[in-house]
Amino acid sequence: MTTTTPQTSGAEQAQAVPQVTLTIDDVEVSVPKGTLVIRAAEQIGIAIPRFCDHPLLQPVGACRQCLVEVATPDREGTVRPMPKPQASCTLEATPGMVVRTQRTSAVADKAQHGNLELLLINHPLDCPTCDKGGECPLQNQTMSNGPGRSRFHDVKRTFPKPIAISTQILLDRDRCVLCQRCTRFSEEIAGDPFIDLQQRGVRQQIGVFDPAVLGFAGAAPAEVYRGVQPDGTPVDASIGVPARDAAGPAGDAALDTSGRPFASYFSGNTVQICPVGALTSAAYRFRARPFDLVSTPGIAEHDSNGAAIRVDHRRGVVLRRLAGDDPAVNEEWISDKDRFAYTWQGMPDRLTVPLVRDRGEDGTPGELRPASWAEALETAAEGLAAARGAGGVGVLPGGRLTLEDAYAYAKFARVTLGTNDVDHRARPHSAEEEAFLAHHVAGSRMSVTFADLENAPTTLLVAYEPEDEGGIAFLRLRKGVLAHRNRVFSVAPFASRGLERLDGTLLQAAPGTEAEVLDALAAGAPGALGEAADALGADAIILVGERLATVPGGLTAVLGLARRTGARLAWIPRRAGERGGVEVGTLPALLPGGRLVTDAQARVDVAASWDVERLPAQAGRSADEMIAAAADGTLGGLVVGGLDPADLADPALARTALEKVGFLVSLEVRESAVTRLADVVLPVAPPVERPGTFLNWEGRPRPFPQALTSTAMADHRVLDALADTMGAGLGLGTLAQVHAEIDGLGAWDGERAPAPTVPAAQPPAVGEGQAVLATWHLLLDDGRCQDGERFLAGTAQRPVARLSAATAAGLGLSTGEGLTVRTDAGQVTLPLAVTPMPDGVVWLPTSSVGSAVRATLRVDAGAVVSVSAAAHVNEGEAL
Amino acid sequence: MADKDITRRESAGEVGAGEQPHRYESLIEPKKGLGELLAPVAGFGVTLSSMFKPTVTEQYPFEKVPTKPRFHGRHQLNRYPDGLEKCIGCELCAWACPADAIYVEGADNTPDAQFSPGERYGRVYQINYLRCIFCGLCIEACPTRALTMTNEYELAGPSRRGMIYEKSDLLAPMGEGMLAAPHPMVPGTQDTDYYRGNVSGPVPEQVDWVAQWRPEDSTLPSARRAPATPPAADSPHGAHGQVERTPAEASEATR
Ligand code: SF4
Ligand code: SF4
Ligand code: SF4
Ligand code: FES
């Protein structure tokens, strides 16, 4: 139990628990009642060998490796030995217990030796090829607590190997010691038991669901390997035999993109906790040995949870990432995206030198060419100075920045460019959202924490899918649901897979009606609404996602609800840099520390700290306004950070704006849609090649060191150099300088921004053959940060479109048939999954393969689109 | 005072120049008579007598003398009789090396590029002969007997880079009847069959595969000629056929 927050009821309970005193190897130790003997031994530094025991999983006593000799006092108080050695991982310490481990008891030692010999009887001699070799608890404990030789001379049991559980996770059953850590993880933590124990006796094995027993659907073997013969003939092969699964009625929604039953977003954790090399990941299989690797702690850059990771690299190449151990944030778990999606940082399209585009006499743009830093900075400085005169320069930093970089962008915009036109929100957003962020989020660090998610008896999710839009918060919520019977309510169009596993209650809301539903949450309301209203008290938490920004009045309604009920409210964006950006002022109306641009005193404060005469007082433009201004020529230039135009509300307009704008400077890690249009491209370092700090959604700083040796510069250094070239440096060349400035500014203690008051809009009328669009991102989709990892891509959920049964029937469609969603701009065709949801609503994944909603349809959630049966369905695709 | 006890040390030229506690006295008894007369030239006797003894000087590099059979020379990465590599890229040799001279990277064997039996092969294999101390611990560590040592000792070169031997420099030459990797394993066999020596040469399926994808391969004629049952032994050893089989391999062949 974490004790980092003041109001963890769990921590208080822990203090109230009485202590018991026992003796382990003649050492007396006092532990809280209920502590397992194996944990008590750890406290005094005695390691008992174990395989199945894991501090975050329920004890099972499956492997029998932790046997110790135990004696307990009987009713008269005489200490009587138990007749046989006991498994210390399932045994609770009791007062007066006398435990002897392998260190002082020959019986325990012999029992452990015997058990290891038994485990090794059928264990293959795979160590030379096994990925676990060198960091294998079975190898290690055989050396420390096992027999040096085997007396077994017969033929070992073998299994065909490996089985591909998904394209990413491979299983060698003969190496498995049946400890069930993997199955317990998927049942107890992730809640998606994609593998289970099957068969009996010597044939007992871990495997994917046996269709005969569990009625689970399956499909073709996963194509784990795709390559070409020397002449270019493609070969597809699965490594080993496919798992035993047969076709069934589960439908597309339950499949992953490789056509297998969808496994899990958290499957990589089983590889890490498997105490042998039975579970391995295709991405790391046969790539390295632990002694090759240099490990550096890190923070996952994919979402706003700020999960602790460990980056393992060899000779400047990242080979794998593992979950770090941070009890306050991610415990020991990370999502598969955090674990496997690291290849983007070292792709061949990495930018290593600055690029400059020469313009002809008449201003026609030429080709980008490599340039020196000095030349590129000069060119950028001149161009920006000119653009400042010709309508001003806007700054679009993107939502993936570290705190330090965001601070540099905020200062660069105000000091060097003299504008408040800076907005990190590379997604649909609204003025109401900005007001909400200024009112509620900025400067309110750690008001809701992960521990609170676990302990709050009620959580209401609004426009937020904890599993798809992050992952770690989902695990914490689920832990609370299982341990404390917490309740989760979600305002969404349908109950997602994640909500079902949270045992959650759906408060059904068609897109655009969220505000209405929130307002209707009052005691005495009918059905689930009333239930939710009753449960929402001062100890409840409301989690709101970034998507509510697109619902007029949504955030106003959420604030109203929080005020009415006294529940605490937290905003959880998807991207890692959004929370930090709010804090350090990469928003048009916000200065660092939650200060308001409109507040004269705040401007004076910041100007004094920045050593400038004054700051621009005129309100800045939002990202959408900047894009519009650039497209119609009123904005002279743009400085763009890590941002994909396809993520903006109108990607086509964004592209026009980037083409048309007078001068475009791009700070990017890899070649992108922005760099291809830029006048000057300044390469910046990806997270592994620079130190920095992410601020996660709690407002918790998550600092990380530089993992790889590199000469690449972080954004704040590049901006500092650029500002220097333009006349006056920012003094932000080093992390220490940035931190000193942020600390010096401190938090704002003046007036907070007023809450937004935006009335809810009427939901649009839906005509015949039309539907309102609902959409959000799946965790694994077509995003640029998942590039280059095909094994991971295979485990993504297969994109489907969703309609209610009645709407589907109206179109004459059923599950599995093709549905076409159309607007004037384009169309998306996906297989249909009939889902219990409001009639007249269609759901699409925002950015999956074949479903780039914003780029193709040019609309977002809440818009009216036409739906029809697909004209022609490709058989292979419909499957 | 402590520094009073410290005596002055002689400087270099003065060593021994101070008091002489003992005069030198030879322990050998001085010769008498004729012996005393011839003593100054007695040393020439050794020279004279050795003129009539056999010569031990080796005329290297004009004449090369075979080393002792267990001499630790350059490494070699062996092959199975059908030409597949024995190395599985396990890095145990690198791990065992006390001089950190070996660098290995493993990779997957794939259906279109099978280099060794089983799932894994050594994609990168380097030995740095500026570091190697020829202790042979790597040979002991190798679980597949892929790595052995030849008797080749001529390991010198003009550049540092050239002293890092790549996999191509270390791989055993193709023996008669061998088929160059990559090619599929003998159908119906597993990696254990290779370890046990049950594979004695390329089979027609493998020859056909290579003929289909690499018709120009230079080992094809010899692999076609070879009967399907060449001796179940290792490749002929030694660099360029000069050197005899090393003991490690000799003992392996007798297993
Ligand atoms: S699981 Fe451990 S003991 Fe078993 S083959 Fe792999 S490294 Fe060896
Ligand atoms: S696969 Fe690994 S984690 Fe799962 S039961 Fe086997 S040994 Fe345990
Ligand atoms: S030579 Fe032997 S020890 Fe070295 S990597 Fe190859 S198989 Fe392993
Ligand atoms: S660790 Fe106790 S039985 Fe497995």
Image: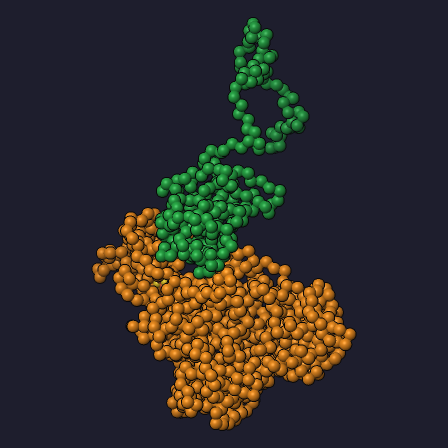
* Res. A45 in view: no
Q: Name the colour scheme.
A: by chain
Residue at the location (34% across, 47% down)?
A: A148
Q: Nearer the viewer, residue A795 or A225?
A: A225
Give the quadrant of the N terminus of chain B: top right
Which residue occupies 32% across, 54% down? A120
In the image, ligand 2 is in what quadrant? bottom left
The x and y percentages for residue A561 are: 48, 86
Extreme residue toward the top, this view: B33
| Residue farthest left in this picture | A76
In the rendered image, residue B94, in percent from the top left (x then y), is placed at 48, 48
The image quadrant of residue A660 is bottom right
Location of residue B18 with respect to A300 vertically, above or below: above
Depth check: give the residue in front, A841 or B164: B164
Residue A358's place in the image compared with A839, above or below, is: above
Residue A499 as seen in the image, left or right of residue A826: left
> Nearest the camera: B249 or B239?
B239
The vertical placement of B203 against A819, above or below, is: above
The orange-tinted chain is A
Q: Which chain is green in the picture?
A: B
Q: Is residue A392 above or below residue A222?
A: below
The quarter of the picture where the C terminus of chain B appears is top left
Question: Measured from the top left, where is residue A414 in percent x and y?
Answer: 68, 76
Q: Quadrant of residue A644?
A: bottom right
Which x, y percent locates residue A94?
Answer: 30, 62
Q: Quadrant of residue A122?
A: bottom left
- State the residue at coordinates (54%, 87%): A823
Residue at (32%, 63%) from the top-left corner? A205
Is residue A496 visible in the rendered image? The answer is: yes
